[in-house]
Each structure stands twice: as structure tokens, then as C-alpha cells.
Amino acid sequence: MILKKFGEIVREQRKKCGYSQEELSFHAGLHRTYIGMIERGEKNITLLNIEKIAKALNVKIKELFDEL
Amino acid sequence: MILKKFGEIVREQRKKCGYSQEELSFHAGLHRTYIGMIERGEKNITLLNIEKIAKALNVKIKELFDEL
């Protein structure tokens, strides 16, 4: 399912950056528990928040959808 | 701004398919006025609806973000 796959990619990319969930949440301006929910595919994330996460991970949005 | 750019790409891809907004809304299972709002960048679209639109346009999600 798309939300779950997207969450796995965010987790992968976050680890590549060497960030904890807390660090990613800080850089993205999102709440730490929200990042956890995204990574577990529990939230139907919006495009504005996808953009925030991509910026914080220093990747283009399309890179978050490469495998999808 | 991301929502506006995304909307322009949806419009472009929709026209490539030869669909009216009404036809796209039918194939995506979304409301016609919602498609109009997306194309004008007036809605912060969610990932599940991005997926519906990509499927209806017969493209991969990442293709909707190629230029972003």
C-alpha cells in the first residue's frame, strides 16, 4: 500500500542522512510523533508535508517515489 | 509554489490523455470541482489522492514530480 511504501522510503532516506526521527522532525518543522506515523504508513500525508520532508532529507520529491 | 506547479503538471498530463476535468474525475473517483482546485493549486492534495490521479492518468507518481 502506497502510504506504507512511502513511509519505508522516508525511513531509508532518513537513515542515509544519519538522522534520528527527532532530527528529521526538527529539520522538516514537523512533530516527531508525526514522522513516526508517516514512516509506519499511518498518515495520509499531504503534498506540502511531502515537500518539507524532501527538503529536510535533501532529495527531490520524485526521489521519494522512485520505487513506487 | 509546489501546489501550483503540481496542478500545472496534472493539467498537462490530463490534456495529453485527451481527458476533460470531468473525465479525469470519473477515472480517478474524485469530484470534478476537486480536480479543478487541484489544477489551480488551491488544495493541499494527499498522497492517496495523488495516487488516484496518477493511476487515472496512467503515469507513475514520480512522473508527476519530474519537473519539481
Image: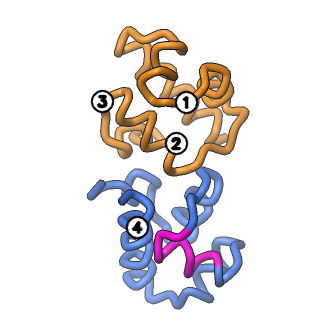
Chain colours: A orange, B blue
The three-letter amino acid code for the residue at tag 3 is Asn
For the residues labelled 2 and 1, the Cα–Cα distance comes to 8 Å
Could you tell me which secondary element the residue under label 4 belongs to?
helix
Quarter of the image with the N terminus of chain B is bottom left
Q: Residues within 10 Å of mark 2 (few under 14, many from 20)?
A: some
Determine if the magenta segment contains residue B25. no
Could you tell me which secondary element the residue under label 1 belongs to?
loop
Is residue A15 or residue A19 the one in the foreground? A19
Which circle marks residue A58 in the picture? Answer: 3
Q: Earlier in the sequence, mark 3 or mark 1?
A: 1
The three-letter amino acid code for the residue at tag 1 is Leu
The residue carrying mark 2 is: A49
The answer to whether marks 2 and 1 sit on the same chain is yes
In the figure, residue B52 lies in which quadrant?
bottom right
Task: Kindly indicate whether the residue at mark 1 contacts the one at mark 2 (C-beta within 8 angstroms).
Answer: yes
Q: Earlier in the sequence, mark 2 or mark 1?
A: 1
The three-letter amino acid code for the residue at tag 2 is Asn
Which circle marks residue B4 in the picture? Answer: 4
